[in-house]
Image: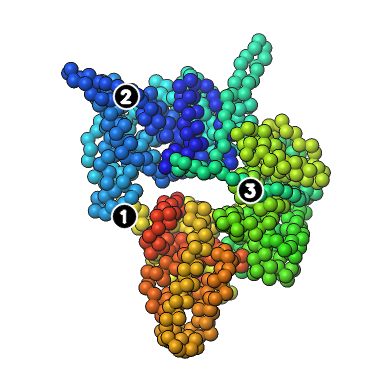
Amino acid sequence: MGVAPPYRKLVEIIAKAAGDGGRRTVLIWPASEISLAASAVLTCLADCLAATAIEVVHDGEKFSALSTPIGLRTLLFPAASTVHRPLKDVYADKTTIARCHTQHHVRAIRYADQAGLADYHQALSRVKTLTGRARDGRVYDEFRHPNLDEMVASGPLSGPVPDHGHLLWHARSKTDLRVQSRTGLADDPKAAPYFAFSLRADDAAAARINAAALPLDALLLDLTRRGRARLGLHWRERIRELTAKVEAAHRGIGVVALTDDPWTFDAVRFEALAIETRVRARVERKPCLSEVVFAVDSAVAAPAQETPTQWRGCERIAVEGFGGDLVAEVARLRSLATTATDAGDLRGAEIVRRLIGRLRRAASLPASLGALSDYVTEEMGSAVAAEQVAAYQVNALIADLTEPSSVLSQVAYDDLTASVAKARELRGKVDLATPMSSLVEAAVRKYLGSSSKCLFVFRSDLIAELAYDDLASRLPDLEARIDNGMIHFTDVQGAADIASLPDAERNHFFRMVLVGPTRAQLLGWMAKPWLPKELLILLDLDTIRSTSRDALRLSEYPEFSSLQQRLSLLAQKTREAASRLGGAAINLDSLEAPPEDVEVPLGSVVDMAGPSRTPRDLIEFTLSNDLTVIARPRTRLVSKLPSQALVSYGETEASKVGKGDEICVMGRAFIEKMRPLLNISAVAAEEIRTYHDLVREKFDALMPGQSVSARLRVVSEKMGLPRVEPATIRYWVTLHDEADKALHDVVPHAPRDRETFLRFMAALGLSDGAARRFWAWAVIAQRSVRQRVGAVLYDAYRSILVDPHGADASQLDRLTSVKAVRSAAEQFVATVTARREFRG
């Protein structure tokens, strides 16, 4: 493995900016999670590895060494606690690192002015001693090589260096590497030749930036979607202010801004980081230098020999949308937000924007809000339902806007009153039906009798299940079409599962219907290597307009020439749809911010108790990350266990969890994060045939010569109590029809609960370990639109966390995915801050 091409390009850009100074804006697309922190560390490594061979003479003796590196001290803004997370899962080859820094150390120790470099090279030269053995005596792959997060010291711009900011902190904390003797200069923010400083958005105003105290070589600005979210609505002004402040203190510093969409790219280079020069009485503004990089994904490492991507499908695109009263109301509300901002009422402007978001979110539901409330209450309980519906309520926001003391009530009373009345009217309508629900139903009716398979892709598994539940009551033929695989309702990751199938299977899907994707998601779909031949896209008018503008911009960059046909077609079809819906002409040169994406709330309540029609004993846990978990006393939670080396997890009954304990919150956000890391459905497709073959073999070998009914009775007796009827077991062992099906259509014939499944496996003579493996990979992982995906996958991922070896650590590719899940799970660990027992 080597450094992925997008990161190699970023290393070049950062190195040039640090050396030459000046401002640069970078657009990396379609990947949306490129790490500037990783790019900074890779630039430091490249600086050392690029040194030329020299000879050092000491006391008349010649020594082979490497030339002095330049050094690099960067400031990342806006930072967060998660910015270094991608670095922890990428490891550098210890042999290459040790050889390089050993030769550097030969030179550095002979020059008094290179004391910081000497300490840095000495520390990294020691990585050659890593064997994987931790102080607990066990060997772990994670300690065979250093990870990127520990190869450059890091810390806040002001304040002490944290424990995880020191060189080789990960290896030193768990192995004997800790005993080495060093000066520590490479960990000193004032003396280290390589250091990654960070500055949080909330700390920028009070930051003291002094070149004499803390010299810097490059300012790295994260203006991806996540970075802009940390800065808030006025991120352009904040970027201008900080950049001017840093440049004033550090003359000639290089500035690199990373963006991930074309509008932000233009807004930064033409406005936020534009070069201003005063010519007599006027100020001229010129765009800063810019680069465009094509990145299919955000992986730091990639195979040395990459296979060229083949782009297939997406030959025809159709766009349908809705506007009407919602568009007019949103326009009025945006005008009110501008009025509030001009009057200095930033809080009022933010409330108006939140009101716009809730109206657009409600209109984009594929079913009525009443249907959402009923469905979530039935499937997930009243607590989750109350929170889900609250994300669409507008009364509290309207109350804040209309109180007599509010600025808008005083400066725009008539406009506010009219707009609020219309907002209430629109919100009331979605209780019965939404504009999107009409579009979805029309699309389903259109393709219900089609001879080609059709894939409906919703924003989340919950929304997909809601749409199915709502439509099935009105379209009796839909259930049969889903059962025979002609229509699939799924989410984004489910579509990725299908795209990963062999051509012979995925090409059965002739068309795809994208239901309410965000602007970023829709543009990202254009960069998928495989798509069905036909796409139907259902959107609101605001998203249609902003997508048309951005798709055209992207199509004009030569770096994206392989996608030019798709992007141009999308731009054309969205422009035509906007015209049909009565939208104004799209201004392609405007730097006006596009409307915020309509997000589907994941929720802060994780109800593991499930719905119930009768009161029962429950426990509510309040956690340090502001989530709430509701569980029955005997519900088994995943808890974080203390370990001598790696983080470990175990199962603990909820009744035994108390204040101060750490648990892994496996709610919908957890599932959404893990599914791309470990595609359980794809693994299930590989394992399900093996499971069926083994069950058939074991059952046939049971009492040879006896009738099927006799063997069924024997299995029932062996399973013990509670008794399972032979007729039920017959379904589990009747597998002939499944043998000829395509893998993604195979349905597991097995018990639905774990304990019954293990008893069934034991009755057939399978070991407990094999049974647990099949349970994790072949049974619970298989999903359909009528399964509660979150609940089903919860069991699968829980098994992986608490028993990774039992979940199948025998295959290298799967072992890597299991480790990725366990590593990512750390971000979902939270401390119990309060505990409450109640009946509900």
Between the residue at mark 1 and the residue at mark 3, the CA separation in whole angstroms equals: 48 Å
Helix, strand or loop at disc 3? loop
Q: Is residue 696 visible?
A: yes
Q: Residues within 10 Å of mark 2 (few under 14, many from 20)?
A: few
> In which image quadrant can residue 701 be found?
bottom left
Relative to 816, residue 725 above or below? below
Amino acid type, mark 2 = Ala
Upstream in sequence: badge 1 or badge 2: 2
Colouring of the image: rainbow
Amino acid type, mark 3 = Arg
Dot 1 and dot 2 residues touching (CB under 8 Å)? no
Of badges 1 and 2, the one in the foreground is 2
Residue hosting label 2: 53
Upstream in sequence: badge 1 or badge 3: 3
Q: Residue at x 58, y 68 (%)?
A: 741
Q: Which mark is residue 312?
A: 3
Placement of the C terminus among the 4 image quadrants: bottom right
Helix, strand or loop at disc 2? strand
Q: Residue at x 18, y 20 (%)?
A: 61
Of badges 1 and 3, the one in the foreground is 3
Amino acid type, mark 1 = Ser
Residue 136 in the image: x percent, y percent? 25, 53
Helix, strand or loop at disc 1? loop
Between the residue at mark 2 and the residue at mark 3, the CA separation in whole angstroms equals: 48 Å
Residue 458 in the image: x percent, y percent? 64, 56
Residue 125 in the image: x percent, y percent? 28, 35
Q: Is residue 489 left or right of residue 748?
A: right
Residue hosting label 1: 643
> In which image quadrant can residue 188 be found?
top left
Of residues 711 and 230, the one nearer the viewer is: 711
